Amino acid sequence: MDLHLNEEQLMIRDAARDFAQNEIAPVAEHYDQAGEFPMPIIKQMGEMGFMGIEVPEDYGGAGMDTIAYVLAMEEIAKADVATSTIMSVNNSLYCHGILMFGTEEQRKAWIPPIVLGEQIGAYALTEPMSGSDAGTMRTRAELSEDGSHYVINGIKSWITSGPVAHRIVIFAKTDPDATPKHRGISAFLIETDQPGFTVGKTEPKLGIRASATCEIMFDDYRCPVENILGKPGEGFKIAMTVLDAGRIGIAAQALGVAEAAYDASVQYARERVAFGKPIGAFQMIQQKIADMKTRIEASRLLIYQAALAKMASKKSGARYTTEAAMAKLFASETAMYVAHQAVQIHGGMGYSKELPIERYFRDAKITEIYEGTSEIQRMVIARNELKIR
Ligand code: CAA
């Protein structure tokens, strides 16, 4: 597909590619094995504009469009999915909601430190007993008697960047009796260096091991009323709107890791000789290569379609929920398929830690789970098509 990328889009794609291949790829294995958050890389990415690609320059961002964002995300993920996860949370889950629903004061105060790479952002929706069914959250935010702040109590789990985050967009029930239940949810901007906030257990994970994930606890945390994001009761809508944007980034991330696994497979199939010829000369390998390539290019088209729909929605206000869900569903399942085939093509070497193939395989899996599982994406697409809930 010739998307006629403009100069700005080509520039960020090339800058991301250079940075990813020269600065991230050589250390990706180290951070994965150590399970260490790549803070120096994240700081550099902030300085280069990768932490706020769609954020207007007024708030310290790069002021680019969604196509630029997905191109950069793909390149970073091609080198390391964990790094691209941190990038995705800062760009989409943290900044997008504040840009869409924040006041001017909130945007000016809460966005620049994150996009400049000085601080880390996070997004806290999930709880131990509330994952896919996000509306069932139990975390409670009660308005104080004098109306000056909300008192927040509860536990959030699976918080990407949680152990190192300075600022978090969190969701809590302000009206537990509301019907339907999601109308009792509100969104808040919180700082993690305040009393009442603690980091709980860190999750040991199969993949994206350099991206830190943990539980966070609120114990009578006092959030000033001016730090509510949007209006009371608007939290669920904010969470879902933000996830629509986030899912496009995860799709681009999935595309990146699929491409990394595919490129390695093509090279290996050309070089590895068995039964007197390169294994790529065998039809069983050719079938895998053909299917991998076709699914990758189909993912790319769905991602561009979703990115263009998001860009159009700036003017029309129309939701791009279905486009984002289809892109994430197809690209993440493609990433898993391609990484699986890449291990198979590489045989024992695909299973060995000598090559990054096994890391691609471990990292690809998360794209089918976070920001809504494949099952949730199918539910979202089907409900929107059938117009039933
Ligand atoms: N945009 C705006 N509003 C939306 C929306 C969207 N995309 N989707 C739903 N809404 C609104 C609906 O219009 C409705 O509002 P009204 O009642 O005012 O009409 C309201 O939200 C409730 O909608 P539903 O009845 O469809 O809600 P539901 O309870 O049935 O749940 C769901 C819908 C799609 C399953 C949703 O719960 C969901 O997406 N679940 C998955 C959650 C998820 O993705 N979690 C990932 C956590 S974040 C993460 O992984 C981050 C990380 O750290 C990397």
Image: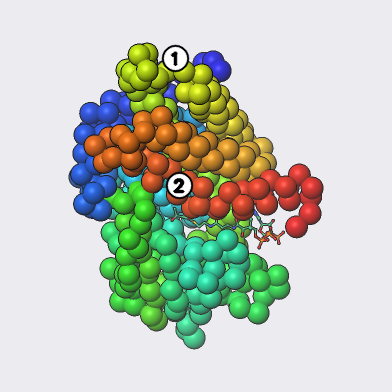
Q: Along the line of sight, which residue is nearer the eye, 18 or 101?
A: 18
In the image, taking residue 185 as reference, residue 150 lies left or right, namely left
107 or 87, nearer to the observer: 87
How far from the left and from the top, in percent, is residue 294? Answer: 55, 24
Q: CA distance from mark 2 to mark 1?
A: 29 Å
Q: Earlier in the sequence, mark 2 or mark 1?
A: 1
> Which residue is painted at 32% across and 65% down in the image?
202
Residue 54 position, x and y percent, is 44, 37
Above/below status of 58 relative to 225: above
Residue that carries the numbered disc 1 in the rendered image: 281
Task: Place residue 317 in its image quadrant.
Answer: top right
- Secondary structure under the numbered disc 2 in the rendered image: helix
The residue positioned 28% from the left and 59% from the top of the image is 164
Q: Position of residue 206 (x, y in %)?
A: 36, 53
Query: Eyeballing the image, is 383 above or below 193?
Result: above
Q: What residue did someone put label 2 on?
A: 365
Q: Are marks 2 and 1 in contact (CB under 8 Å)?
A: no
Q: Secondary structure at mark 1?
A: helix
Residue farthest along the bottom direction in this orientation:
145
Residue ID at (49%, 52%) = 370
